[in-house]
Image (cartoon, coloured by chain):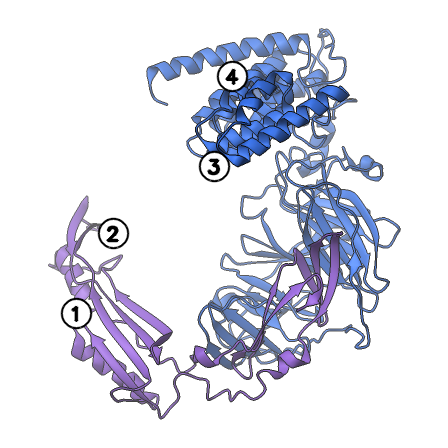
Chain colours: A blue, B purple
């Protein structure tokens, strides 16, 4: 965007936006559903107000890292928390700058624009959208959807039929409700069948009587899909008109959305600041969908305790003990004849199971996490008693961004790893107790509150007993965590780490990395037991025999079998086109 | 399902499950059906699946075994005699010999890469400043494909390319250093695929579908 005209346009938009923010925020809070009256500024600012000033200043003038910190912290604040109109203006301008200048923070920048600029941010969001070369971040479509502005709708319809942005554009227009109607009427007669079809279908969802002439014309289309969509759309509109139902019903802002208004007292940023390292990373959990988890909604989640972590070394090259076979402790009764089990009804049509874990020995249970889709407020956790053959609990209480889970060997505890989203984009651990009628959250923490992109990416996790679990992140760092105290017990790092495999009895683990860094370790204290006598590099993720005496690797058609106790390669052969081993 | 002792793919299972996990030999899989989601236990493998590979002789299914004769087709761009000597030597050290018209055929091709230009920059004490353009000719790739009765079973390749960091001797230009490196470089040692399984004998000996109704 190097041309002079564009630069001028840029400047004009900045000025417009600053003025708009000033008038709107000063008069009322754009996204708040509460009475938005802002108190008159008092002569003496409170400590919290001075903290808002400081953050607003940093958001505008700090270096990139400082601005990120400030943006994340200010996501906890809402305009009606801030008394001083000048501070509100400065925050709005700061979020605008973040959205345009820091690609990694575009989500926060866009959310800040919506929260602090309201409908006045629509032209800015459109400009931001048009500056994207290929894929427009979905947050921009979401933001325009939430703002429900006809100008925004017209801009979004330009992305219908676009390979990279079509789905997000459709979602955005759907969120806009009746505000999208005029724009959809305009694009419905498109020569692009994909655009025409979706516009006609959306008119059925958001349109009024005004759309009927367009739909009647579409009923004469040569494309049978468009004809059918037009007929259905017209019928939807007539039903709505007869029943008096509004298209805006059901379009309330998702309470877990970054754009959602917040009621009640301001969050005490100073108290968070005093809370050691967790201050600026702290964030609220997505609001759970049931009352039992309401209490958790605004609580601050603290980081893991790294104060006593033991750094393990990769040890001497010659370390070689005989590693005892570590068989599976609890088998399954051979006479058991389980039956299929009907699971609980889905919470919505988009819901889909994303993870299942089974454990519990002779009283086995399965836990299943059902994701409700991108816009869901929470994921559903279902617990199934496999012995009794029934689903015993199904509640929408776990974070919507849950990624994977691991069940402790006795089935008493569940670890859920969430990948984070928005301001809350750092990996998060949640440990749930499963003993009671409903799962109960025991602990929740951020393992890497200051981590980089790879550190916060948890690739693998599993329990070694009922109290401790191991994790491996994308930086190759293996950590043993103690649930009590959220404490990191030991860590083992290698930039070349490939995988971790627990022995069936969970006494040992095989850490595969570069040849001189791979080894079998005792799980409870990280004692290095042995190194593989042959290089395992390039050998794929190992699978260990339930009796614990052999392990096999499969990668790109190469199969190898190794003696667990001695690390010697027993046999090898290869096929073409064979996938990786799973068990 | 692989039988590692028999060196075969015993059975193939194809599943439409949304997610699944194991408890002992029970695979618990979530399927989407007319009545919503169902968690279905399926015991694997079935005794009949396991029995499918019982009679396989694990040595007889290897494509190459010591004592066998192998045909060799060689199309080399430049170092034909040397390549042949290296490959035949490796085969003989593993108890194999060359003979015409054998079921197992090694097709060896050496291809020269098109000439290209490369830029190098000297580093260290006394290094010349700026970048030097070098003409790179003589980069090459050796490819070996093993066929059994006309079906490809295994392939391997090795390339000689211009060095990333040429070692310049005293009085030598960068061009001369690159030319020398390319001339002196050799292909990796040919690894005789004694552990390659003849895919026509490697299974699977059956395929089953895992569905909401169990194994079919």
* Residue at 50%, 71% in the rendered image: A536
Q: Nearer the viewer, mark 4 or mark 2?
A: 4
Look at mark 3 in the image and give the residue it sits on: A164
Q: Nearer the viewer, mark 2 or mark 1?
A: 1
Give the quadrant of the C terminus of chain A: bottom right
Look at mark 4 in the image and give the residue it sits on: A123
* Residue at 75%, 22% in the rendered image: A266
Instruction: For the residues labelled 3 and 2, say whether their Cβ atoms are less than 8 Å apart.
Output: no
Q: Secondary structure at mark 1?
A: loop
CA distance separating discs 3 and 2: 48 Å
CA distance separating discs 1 and 3: 46 Å
Of the image marks 4 and 3, the number of the one nearer the N terminus = 4
CA distance separating discs 1 and 4: 64 Å
Disc 4 is attached to a residue of which chain? A
Q: Nearer the viewer, mark 1 or mark 3?
A: 3
Look at mark 1 in the image and give the residue it sits on: B77
Residues A3 and A147: in front is A147
Q: Position of residue B145 (x, y in %)?
A: 32, 74
Q: Secondary structure at mark 3?
A: loop
Of the image marks 2 and 1, the number of the one nearer the N terminus = 1
Q: Position of residue A74 (x, y in %)?
A: 64, 25
Badges 4 and 2, same chain = no
Look at mark 2 in the image and give the residue it sits on: B124
Residues A303 and B141: in front is B141
């Amino acid at each position: 965007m190097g041309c002079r005209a564009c630069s001028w346009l840029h400047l004009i938009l900045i000025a417009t936006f600053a003025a708009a923010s000033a008038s709107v925020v000063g008069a009322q809070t754009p996204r708040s559903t509460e009475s938005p009256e802002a108190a008159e500024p008092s002569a003496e600012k409170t400590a919290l107000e001075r903290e808002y000033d400081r953050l607003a200043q940093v958001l505008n003038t700090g270096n990139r890292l400082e601005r990120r910190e400030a943006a994340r912290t200010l996501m906890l604040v809402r305009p009606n928390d801030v008394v001083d109109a000048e501070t509100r203006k400065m925050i709005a301008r700061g979020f605008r700058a973040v959205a345009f200048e820091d690609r990694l923070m575009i989500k926060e920048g866009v959310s800040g624009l919506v929260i602090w600029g309201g409908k006045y941010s629509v032209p800015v969001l459109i400009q931001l959208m048009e500056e994207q070369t290929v894929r427009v971040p979905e947050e921009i479509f979401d933001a325009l959807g939430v703002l429900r502005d006809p100008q925004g709708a017209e801009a979004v319809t330009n992305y219908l039929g676009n390979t990279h942005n079509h789905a997000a554009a459709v979602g955005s227009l759907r969120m806009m409700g009746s505000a999208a109607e005029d724009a959809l009427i305009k694009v419905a007669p498109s020569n692009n069948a994909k655009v025409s079809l979706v516009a006609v279908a959306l008119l059925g969802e958001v349109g009024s009587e005004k759309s009927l002439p367009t739909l009647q014309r579409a009923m004469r289309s040569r494309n049978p899909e468009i004809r059918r969509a037009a007929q259905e759309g017209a019928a939807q509109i007539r039903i709505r008109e007869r029943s008096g139902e509004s298209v805006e019903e059901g379009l309330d802002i998702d309470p877990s959305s970054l754009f959602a208004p917040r009621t009640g007292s301001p969050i005490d940023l100073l108290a968070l600041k005093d809370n050691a390292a967790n201050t600026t990373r702290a964030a609220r959990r997505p609001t759970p969908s049931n009352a039992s988890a309401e209490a958790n909604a605004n609580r601050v989640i603290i980081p893991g305790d790294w104060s006593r972590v033991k750094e393990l070394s990769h040890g001497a090259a010659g370390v070689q003990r005989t590693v005892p076979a570590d068989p599976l402790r609890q088998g399954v009764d051979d006479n058991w004849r389980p039956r299929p089990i009907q699971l609980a009804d889905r919470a919505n049509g988009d819901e889909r199971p994303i993870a299942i874990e089974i454990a519990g020995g002779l009283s086995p249970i399965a836990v299943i996490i059902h994701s409700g889709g991108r816009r869901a407020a929470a994921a559903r956790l279902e617990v199934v008693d496999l012995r009794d053959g029934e689903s015993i609990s199904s509640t929408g209480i776990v974070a919507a961004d849950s990624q994977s889970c691991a069940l402790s060997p006795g089935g008493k505890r569940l670890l859920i790893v969430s990948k984070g989203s928005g301001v809350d984009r750092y990996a998060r651990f949640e440990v749930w107790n499963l003993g009671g009628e409903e799962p109960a959250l025991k602990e929740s923490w951020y393992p890497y509150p200051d981590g980089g992109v790879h550190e916060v990416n948890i690739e693998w996790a599993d329990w070694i007993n009922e109290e401790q679990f191991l994790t491996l992140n994308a930086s190759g760092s293996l950590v043993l965590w103690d649930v009590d105290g959220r404490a990191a017990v030991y860590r083992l790092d290698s930039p070349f780490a490939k995988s971790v495999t627990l022995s069936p009895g969970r006494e040992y683990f095989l850490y595969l990395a570069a040849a001189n860094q791979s080894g079998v370790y005792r799980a409870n204290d990280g004692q290095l037991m042995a190194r593989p006598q042959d290089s395992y590099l390039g050998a794929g993720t190992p699978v260990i025999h339930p009796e614990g005496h052999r392990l096999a690797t499969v990668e790109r058609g190469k199969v190898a079998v190794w003696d667990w106790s001695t690390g010697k390669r027993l046999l090898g052969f290869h096929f073409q086109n064979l996938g990786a081993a799973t068990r | 399902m692989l039988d590692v002792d028999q060196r075969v793919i015993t059975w193939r299972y194809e599943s439409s499950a949304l997610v699944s996990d194991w408890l002992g030999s029970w695979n618990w899989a979530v399927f989407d059906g007319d009545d919503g989601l169902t968690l279905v236990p399926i015991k694997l493998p079935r005794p009949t699946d396991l029995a499918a590979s019982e009679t396989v002789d694990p040595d007889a299914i290897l494509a190459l075994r010591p004592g066998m004769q192998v045909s060799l087709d060689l199309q080399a761009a430049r170092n034909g005699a040397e390549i042949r000597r290296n490959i035949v030597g490796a085969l003989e050290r593993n108890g194999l010999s060359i003979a015409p018209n054998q079921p197992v055929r090694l097709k060896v091709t050496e291809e020269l890469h098109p000439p290209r230009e490369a830029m190098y920059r000297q580093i260290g004490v006394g290094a010349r400043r700026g970048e030097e353009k070098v003409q790179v000719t003589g980069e090459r790739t050796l490819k070996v494909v093993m066929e059994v009765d006309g079906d490809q079973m295994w392939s391997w390749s090795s390339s000689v390319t211009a060095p990333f960091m040429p070692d310049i001797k005293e009085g030598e230009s960068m061009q001369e250093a690159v030319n020398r490196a390319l001339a002196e470089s050799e292909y990796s040692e040919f690894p005789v695929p004694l552990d390659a399984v003849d895919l026509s004998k490697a299974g699977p000996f059956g395929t089953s579908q895992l569905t909401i109704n169990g194994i079919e």
